[in-house]
Image (cartoon, rainbow, N blue to C red):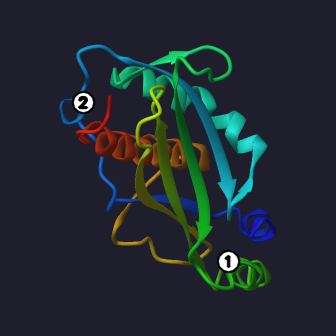
Amino acid sequence: MAAAVFLTGCASVYVDTATKEVADADIRRPATAIPATLVFDYQNSGAPNTRATQFLKDQVTAQVKKTGIFEIAAGEATGKTALLTITINNVPITKDAAQQGFVTGLTFGLAGSAVTDGFVCTVTYVPADGSSTLVSTARHAVHTTIGNASAPANAVKSASIEEGLRTMTRQIVANALRDLSTNPQLK
């Protein structure tokens, strides 16, 4: 796919509209923020992606702090603080994406292609008091077109790949945190 982007120079990124922005008012905040240690991990098909984790870690940390649900503790988790783990897993949706990109490259963009990457965000909260672990998930997608391919109808064009990835991350994390915040067992 990278070769096709290089050869054609015409890749466009679109963030799917099925996963919506979450309004601040939709997040339930406890009376006092819950002290927690945050662990963030970005994966590709279940395998850790250290580079992407480092790229998005500050954004995700700031987003969690902004919700007011958790007070992020520094350092390693201890028995006195809860553990909040956020994992974003990039999972393939489009079959034969590499082959499509190759064909697009060979035709210098005349045979366009479209690829969809799926994302699953899993937020796991382990309370410090040993009570039940809570899990919340959200799903999202980013579409990439190369060459002479039509834009997907269910998506908004991003100015860049980075902007698309950051928008997807903000939306998917917000949806999972919102769902976690409404869980009556959150304490």
At 38% across and 21% down in the image, what residue appears? 66
Identify the amino acid type marked 2.
Asp
- Residue 15, picture quadrant: bottom left
Residue 12 visible in the picture = yes
At 77% across and 81% down in the image, what residue appears? 102
Question: The C terminus appears in which quarter of the rendering?
Answer: top left
Q: Position of residue 48 (x, y in %)?
A: 74, 51
- Residue 71, picture quadrant: top left
Query: Spatial distance from mark 1 to mark 2, Cα to Cα?
Result: 42 Å
Residue sticking out furthest to the left:
25
Q: Is residue 123 left or right of residue 44?
A: left
Asked if 151 appears above or below 17 in the picture, the reply is: below
Asked if 104 appears above or below 53 in the picture, the reply is: below
Q: Nearer the viewer, residue 75 or 144?
A: 75
Q: Residues within 10 Å of mark 2 (few under 14, many from 20)?
A: few
Q: Position of residue 89 (x, y in %)?
A: 60, 56
At 30% across and 51% down in the image, what residue appears? 20
Please name the residue that numbered disc 1 is placed on: 109
Residue 160 visible in the picture = no
Q: Position of residue 170 (x, y in %)?
A: 44, 40
Identify the amino acid type marked 1.
Gly
Q: Residues within 10 Å of mark 1 (few under 14, many from 20)?
A: many
* SS type, badge 2: helix
Foreground mark, 1 or 2, reads 2
At 77% across and 41% down in the image, what residue appears? 51
Q: Nearer the viewer, residue 75 or 90?
A: 75
Please name the residue that numbered disc 2 is placed on: 24
